[in-house]
């Protein structure tokens, strides 16, 4: 039932959906779930209600965009109508509705917006039968912290109406300005703020010289949101050869692919980098542009090593020339970073999984660069991970040192030793059974403190709990970790970004001072066997092997 209020605002009665608790990164559901009447509206109204409780919206700006997946534009049109009805002073809508997560973070910060709504399910596939999502970022440009997402969730459980206005769909195809009642709606080009920011961080002249010298690269945009921006920066600004960016056009179904830049889903790029005439450097980004994959000729740089290496060489990049305040990584991420931080004499913070936990460390100036094992790296230039930033970091390191990625890795391992690292994902498990497996392991933690695995004694067995050194906010159940005497680790946690069933992530790490190039698998085999036994993966789920190994 919809009523028209005296001011022309439409108020529609609704009832709560019980399943709107945001996960690791926003609310993700099947596209069809989001397309059912009132589902998107309920969640967005809950976000606006929570935001309005903190600040009157009339003087506030909302940034709006998405990664271009199926249902992106209709959802944006709905949200524009709702944001007007909720009294925002200004709405900035990305042209064509296309906005990467890092660009959104940049725009929120430069335009001093209250926050932004980003329509994306990141690396999950797109389409009517695939996935959709909504992320809410706050004033600092970062994902809403847990305290805010919990308030939003509680609001979704009591919501009884949402507000909208009668308004024809806006033409998102060109930049424009509209005054609708008290709200100014602007369709803007997000490239400008974001590229200007990157230009301040990096030495574009040095990168241009690299390409002028014949350096060849292949960037796989995976038919996702970074394509146009990557063409602009790499080909138009830095002079990389035309065709450097492949699959550059954003498509609603990402060309049928899975826009997840890892060895499995970016296999075409991996094959190209393994071919005889491979370019010097390969990279890819995910659906919403915040993840990165880094490849050399026949060489994969694992995300934990990439993070450690960027930190090791950060002083070669203008923005970090004066050194880093500190660094941070999510708990499951490899400890390669810790060793570089120790050598630089700076702090290394360990946070729960998800970018939202880095925000207060970055705001407080405690941390300059941070990252996750899930192909995410970023810095204090934003409050999100940033795929193209990571690519430019690598190009800068290559330009400054003359080393190939393989040589840079070798030098790093010689100096610091190597954390052999893999993540094994067991997807499409029965959700209840997966929760039970993790609970059962949690129960056994006290007993495991005295156990041995792979010939090593357990030195720590716990369920990771975190307390922010800045705000004191706490977060529990960050994952079960078992640390062995030689620094090896096994970490177990359930994914918080899936849309069906459950995904169990098993993270394996084994540190060797004399570690060198080569496949990590044989080094991790004893840990993998122990992990199988601990979780009874064969007995409980009939699984012999992970669905995806990265
Ligand atoms: C995964 C990753 C996590 C990342 C999150 C969002 O979460 O493990 O490191 O921050 O995705 O990434 P989970 O709960 O499924 O393990 V993205 O590119 O969505 O914004
Ligand atoms: Co992403």
Image (cartoon, grey):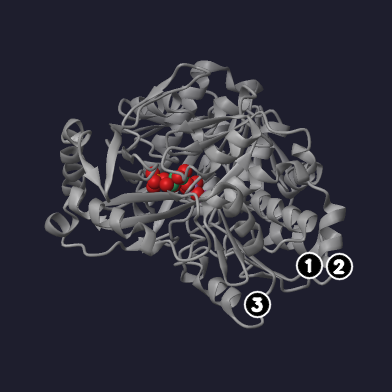
Tell me the element at label 3: loop
Spatial CA distance of label 3 from label 1 is 15 Å
Q: Position of residue 472 (x, y in %)?
A: 46, 16
Residue 177 in sight here:
yes
Q: Are marks 2 and 1 in contact (CB under 8 Å)?
A: no
Q: Which residue is mark 3?
A: 278
Closer to the chain start, of discs 3 and 2, is 2
Q: Nearer the viewer, residue 507 or 166?
A: 507
Residue drawn at x 34%, y 39% is 485
Q: Is mark 2 within 8 Å of ligand 2?
A: no
Query: Which badge, 3 or 1, is on the more N-terminal residue?
Result: 1
Q: Nearer the viewer, residue 94 or 324?
A: 324
Q: In which quadrant of the rendered view does residue 359 lie? A: top right
Q: Could you tell me which quadrant the N terminus lies in?
A: top left
Q: Is residue 28 visible?
A: no
Q: Which label lies toward us, 3 or 1? A: 3
Q: For mark 2, does the 10 Å Cα neighbourhood hold few (<14), some (14 to 19), or many (20 or more) residues?
A: some
The quadrant where residue 16 appears: top left
Image spot of residue 26 (x, y percent): 44, 40
Q: For mark 2, what is the residue?
A: 212
Query: Mark number for residue 240?
Result: 1
Picture residue at 64% right of the left edge, 55% below the top: 411
Q: Quadrant of the C terminus?
A: bottom left
In this orientation, which residue lies closer to the viewer: 333 or 412?
Answer: 412
């Amino acid at each position: 039932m919809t009523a028209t209020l005296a001011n022309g605002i439409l108020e529609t009665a609704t009832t709560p959906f019980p399943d709107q608790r945001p996960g690791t990164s926003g609310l993700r559901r099947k596209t069809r779930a989001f397309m059912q009447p009132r589902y998107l509206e309920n969640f967005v109204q809950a976000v606006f209600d929570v935001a309005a409780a903190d600040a009157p919206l009339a003087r506030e700006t909302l940034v709006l965009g998405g990664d271009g997946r199926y249902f992106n534009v209709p959802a944006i049109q709905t949200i524009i109508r709702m944001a007007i009805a909720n009294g925002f002073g200004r709405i900035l809508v990305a042209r064509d509705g296309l906005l990467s997560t890092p660009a959104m973070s940049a725009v929120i910060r430069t335009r001093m917006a209250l926050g932004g709504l980003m329509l994306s399910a990141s690396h999950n596939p797109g389409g009517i039968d695939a996935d959709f999502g909504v992320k809410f970022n706050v004033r600092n440009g970062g994902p809403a912290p847990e305290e805010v997402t919990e308030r939003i969730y509680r609001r979704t459980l009591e919501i009884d109406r949402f507000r909208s206005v009668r308004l024809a769909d806006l033409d998102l195809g060109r930049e424009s300005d509209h005054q609708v009642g008290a709200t100014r709606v602007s369709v803007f080009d997000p490239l400008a703020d974001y590229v200007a920011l990157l230009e301040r961080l990096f030495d574009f002249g040095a990168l241009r010289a690299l390409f002028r010298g014949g350096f060849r690269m292949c960037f796989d945009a995976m038919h996702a949101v970074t394509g146009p921006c990557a063409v602009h920066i790499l080909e138009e600004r830095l002079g990389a050869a035309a065709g450097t960016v492949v699959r550059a056009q954003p498509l609603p179904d990402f060309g049928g692919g899975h826009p997840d830049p890892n060895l499995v889903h970016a296999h075409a790029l991996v094959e190209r980098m393994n071919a005889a005439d491979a370019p010097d450097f390969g990279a890819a980004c995910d659906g919403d542009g915040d993840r990165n994959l880094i490849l050399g000729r026949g060489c994969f740089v694992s995300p934990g090593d990439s993070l450690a290496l960027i930190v090791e060489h950060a002083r070669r990049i203008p923005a970090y020339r004066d050194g880093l305040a500190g660094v941070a990584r999510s708990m499951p991420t490899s400890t390669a970073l810790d060793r570089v931080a120790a050598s630089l004499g700076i702090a290394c913070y360990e946070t729960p999984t998800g970018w939202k936990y880095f925000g207060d460390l970055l705001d407080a100036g405690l941390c300059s660069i941070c990252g996750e094992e899930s192909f995410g790296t970023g810095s204090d230039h934003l409050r999100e991970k940033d795929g193209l930033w990571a690519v430019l970091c690598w190009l800068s390191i290559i330009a400054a040192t003359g080393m190939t990625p393989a040589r840079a890795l070798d030098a790093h391992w010689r100096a610091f030793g190597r954390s052999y690292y893999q993540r094994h994902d067991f997807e499409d498990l029965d959700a209840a059974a997966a929760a039970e497996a993790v609970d059962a392991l949690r129960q056994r933690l006290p007993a495991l403190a005295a156990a041995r695995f792979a010939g090593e004694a357990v030195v720590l067995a716990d369920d990771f709990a975190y307390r922010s050194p800045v705000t004191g906010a706490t977060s529990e159940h960050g994952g079960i970790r078992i640390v062995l005497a030689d620094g090896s680790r096994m970490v177990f946690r359930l994914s918080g970004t899936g849309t069906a069933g459950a995904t169990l992530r098993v993270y394996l790490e084994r540190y060797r001072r004399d570690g060198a190039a080569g496949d990590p698998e044989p080094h991790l085999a004893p840990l993998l066997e122990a992990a199988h036994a601990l979780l009874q993966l064969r007995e409980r789920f009939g699984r012999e092997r992970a669905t995806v190994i990265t």
